[in-house]
Amino acid sequence: MAERYLAARGIDFGNGILDPEAKRFGSIELTRVQSNSGGYVGADAGGNQILLNVRSGTMPFRVLSLSQIKSGQVNPDWIRGKIVLIGMMSFSAKDQASSGAIAGINPGQIYGVEMQAHATSQIVSAVLDGRSLLRVWADAWEYLWIVAWGLLGISLGRFLRSPWKILFGLLVASVSSIGVCYGLILLGWWVPIVPVLLVLVLNGAGLMAALFYRHEQELRLRLEERQFAIEQTFNAIHSGPLQTLVGILRSAQEQATPPPFLPELQRLSQELRAVYGSVQREAIAGEPHLGMGSAIELALQAPLHELLYKVYCNTLEQELPYLKTLKFKIVQFDPLNTSHLRLEHKRALCRFLEEALCNVGKHAIEATRLTVICTQEGDRQVIRVADNGRGKPSQSETLSLAQMDRDRETTEDPNPKLQPSGLGTQLAKNLAKQLGGAFRRYPNQPKGMVCELTWSAKRRWFR
């Protein structure tokens, strides 16, 4: 039918040029189906078969019944110059073909005459209108296509690392592959999609499962190493400094008049033992917290401003000499952006505030006003502790954050490298460096000292 219809329009029919055994109408060659074409594997490719690019819609052709023709309900223009197929459209005629690509009243079933109409329409439209015929890639290109998606699945597992990121990447890649295949079939290319999805998901999921297993093994190993380090550290403390402290306590208790510092020594002994229990519980439970003395533990998952406020309240309850002279306390604890902070950063910030407040209690002589600010100023977040104390002469305590002459009448040394730097100061500077911020300590006006830590409210792009 297509040959006669096209011959009337001067289009010759012959053998193919690329494939002599294929059929050709003019310059349009009907590519033969091979046993492994497209999604087929070992299909029966006998004879001269082509892939059928069916028309869309439930009624792609005009259908006239015999009663309409007898009653004259036919417009001559519907038939003039058209290809007309006559056949039975009844299931009783047992002339059906199976095809899931054609929508109809009975999905998967199509009348034989309709199938002939789709085939004839495809050939005529391809020759006259340039409608795309279904084509397939050579086997080598199909294998390369499948391998490329498989390598993508492996790459997701190697570069994303996080299992949830891998899962999201697999979802995006799977949707993309389906979209690409759909776009190609609209252009007339039928490429394999099921093998692509299989290699993509299997490679990505396999690596994701391996990552889960490796992550679990690493966590178990780190937990064992941490527990060993805790035991080793406490054994060293228990065998050395703690035994020395116990000896001092025993000597002090045996005196007729116990020295005034005896309660402080007893509290120090309790706190040292409490630190071991706190760190051990954290290592076993895996829930990071901040220990404040022997009885208070703060969960680090809480908002940072709430943690800082609890640290402030707990520290001011300590028996430090110059905290008792405070008459005015100005505090501000606003919510802070912690999306780019790790739990260890939150712990260090809390320790910084605790150390700064303890220094006020130890060194700010006759301090009557304390200002504690934890807020965001512009694009910077700040923790600032200021007092109006008179200050002590230069201290030599190695654990003090101040670690400098707090005499308000002197100015800072212009060469800070020559100043002594204690452990607290070093920790504060290291924390500021990790957060991309700055640590400053400068005289308050008219007297006192300001201890300040600032850092960016946003994640740095190179971190």
Image (tube, rainbow, N blue to C red):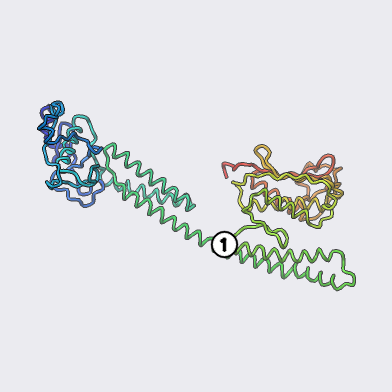
- Image coordinates of residue 453 in percent, x first then y, are 71, 45
Residue behind mark 1: 222
Figure quadrant of the C terminus: top right
- Where 227 sits versus 417, above or below? below
Q: State left or right for residue 164 relative to residue 369.
A: left
Q: Residues within 10 Å of mark 1 (few under 14, many from 20)?
A: few
- Image coordinates of residue 229 in percent, x first then y, are 63, 65
Name the residue at the right extreme. Answer: 256
Amino acid under label 1?
Answer: Arg
The residue nearer to you, when weighing 360 against 107, is 107
The residue positioned 41% from the left and 48% from the top of the image is: 171
The residue positioned 27% from the left and 42% from the top of the image is: 190
- Image coordinates of residue 277 in percent, x first then y, are 67, 65
Residue 301: tell me if it is visible.
yes
Query: Callout 1: helix, strand or loop?
Result: helix
Q: State left or right for residue 344 relative to residue 416.
A: left
Q: State left or right for residue 127 relative to residue 268.
A: left
- Where 124 sits versus 324, above or below? above
The quadrant in which residue 83 appears is: top left
- Where 203 sits versus 12, above or below? below
- Image coordinates of residue 372 in percent, x first then y, are 75, 46
Name the residue at the front extreme. Answer: 71
Figure quadrant of the N terminus: top left
The residue nearer to you, when weighing 145 against 76, is 76
Residue 439: tell me if it is visible.
no
| Count of numbered marks | 1
- Where 24 sits versus 39, above or below? above
The residue positioned 41% from the left and 54% from the top of the image is: 205
